[in-house]
Amino acid sequence: MTVRASVLRHGPRALTIVAAALSLVVVGQVAVSMNASNAPAGTVLRYVPGDAHATARQAWDLAQTGKTRDAWSSARQLAVRALAKEPTDIIAVRAAALASAQSGNLPRAGKLFDYAEALTRRDLITHIWFIENAAERGDVATALRHYDLALRTSRAAGTQLFPVLAHATSDPEIARQLADFLASGPPWADGFYRTLIGQDVPPETVASFVQRLHARGVKLPNEVLDGAIANLAAAQRADLAWKLYQATAPASAASLLRNGSFDRADRAVPFEWQYAQEGSIAASREAEEKSFVLAFRAEGGASGEIARQMIALAPGRYRLEADVGLDKADNLRLEWQVACVGQAQPLAKLPAESAAVFSVPAGQCPQQWLALKLVQAADTAAEGRVANVRLQPQPGS
């Protein structure tokens, strides 16, 4: 069973469940790397009988591949022989420790791994064993400390460790302690955040964890925040996406409409402008004299969406207007459409060239899409500009 499958199958106590599987994966990868960078132990021993380092590597290979108590006993004997000549050989110490663990002698294995850590804090496999041991005892704090040391030891460790941590955020206690730890700003934090939003972790879990981090004052990269919000919206959880946007961008969220003047770059979230970039219509934010506008270009006969933004209007009446500049073509027309998120039928279709009023009903319409569309196209290629989009509540609404 893979690490990810183990997490998904066993749920909340993921950190405990996957520790053993993770250790085998990482130990195996480190062993491959070790053997690739050295001559085979048997070859070295033929030319230098009794070489401590080669004997240690032979013990390590046997400790990993052995399937019987006799094999593990032989691994321990080889490791002891190597340590007799070189007491600080970390490979020999690990080999003796792993062979003891394989044989079921965990107290001896623990003492040997303690010795390994005393020799060096930069041995990845030693940290993996401590992660497994702490997780099995439910000691999240110790497991996280060794996660930290392992991730500082090897950049490659994140490939295996980050997905495990990402899935473990579904456990409230692990999430709490992990958020506290990340608030200290470990150097690997950004790599973990990017893994978090790229894994198949439920978006609700990611949102909850991101809010924990935000509450602790952790400044997340915009791409991480944007990814978490966009994933929620894509999962039909616009309500949670809006709450996360409000929590992490309160000033922007306080406006009925974001960036109506187009004076700043939009984030990659549905609550800011999203511009058409494919097909026969292309739109973008462009500078024009001393201000910015939404500019679009359409191929001849093209129609469709130019830009959209998700808004969260309370029930009531609203006035929408904008400054619109179009080519002189007689049959070129723009239209605003307002629709409840998750519903195909628009609440309103409003001419973009003049001010218009629309209503948001009470009930199941807490978020809405505001979309600018080219509904009647010119026969030839056409261009247009939209600026100063204003959205205001109407008196008595």
Image (tube, helix red, strand yellow):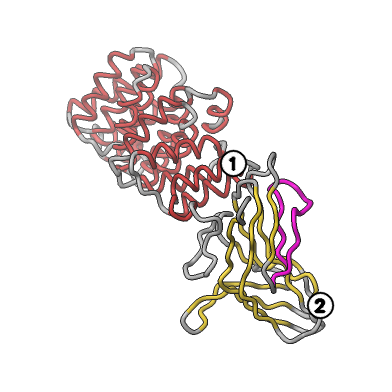
Q: Circle 1 sits on which residue?
A: 239
Q: Earlier in the sequence, mark 1 or mark 2?
A: 1
Q: Nearer the viewer, residue 224 or 356?
A: 356
Instruction: Specify whether 281 is left or right of 226.
Output: right
Residue 101 is one of the magenta-drawn residues? no
Q: Position of residue 289 (x, y in %)?
A: 49, 84
Image location (x, y in percent) of residue 84:
18, 25
CA distance for labels 1 and 2? 37 Å
The residue nearer to you, when weighing 92 against 296, is: 296
Q: Is residue 128 above or below residue 331?
A: above
- Say what amino acid the circle numbered 1 marks: Asp
Q: Is residue 211 above or below residue 368?
A: above
Q: Are marks 1 and 2 in contact (CB under 8 Å)?
A: no
- Report crowding for label 2: few under 14, some 14 to 19, many 20 or more residues within 10 A (C-alpha): some
Front one among 384 and 78: 384
Mark 1, residues whose alpha carbon is within 10 Å: few (<14), some, or many (≥20)? Answer: some
Locate residue 342 relative to residue 165 in the image: left or right: right
Q: What residue is rendered at 63% in x and 44% in y?
A: 366
SS category of the residue bearing label 2: loop
Tell me: residue 156, above or below residue 371. above
| Three-letter code for the amino acid on which mark 2 is drawn | Gly
* Local SS, label 1: helix
Q: Which residues are magenta?
A: 335-352
In magenta stretch: residue 344: yes
The quadrant the N terminus occupies is top right
Q: Nearer the viewer, residue 182 or 64?
A: 182
Q: Which residue is mark 2?
A: 301
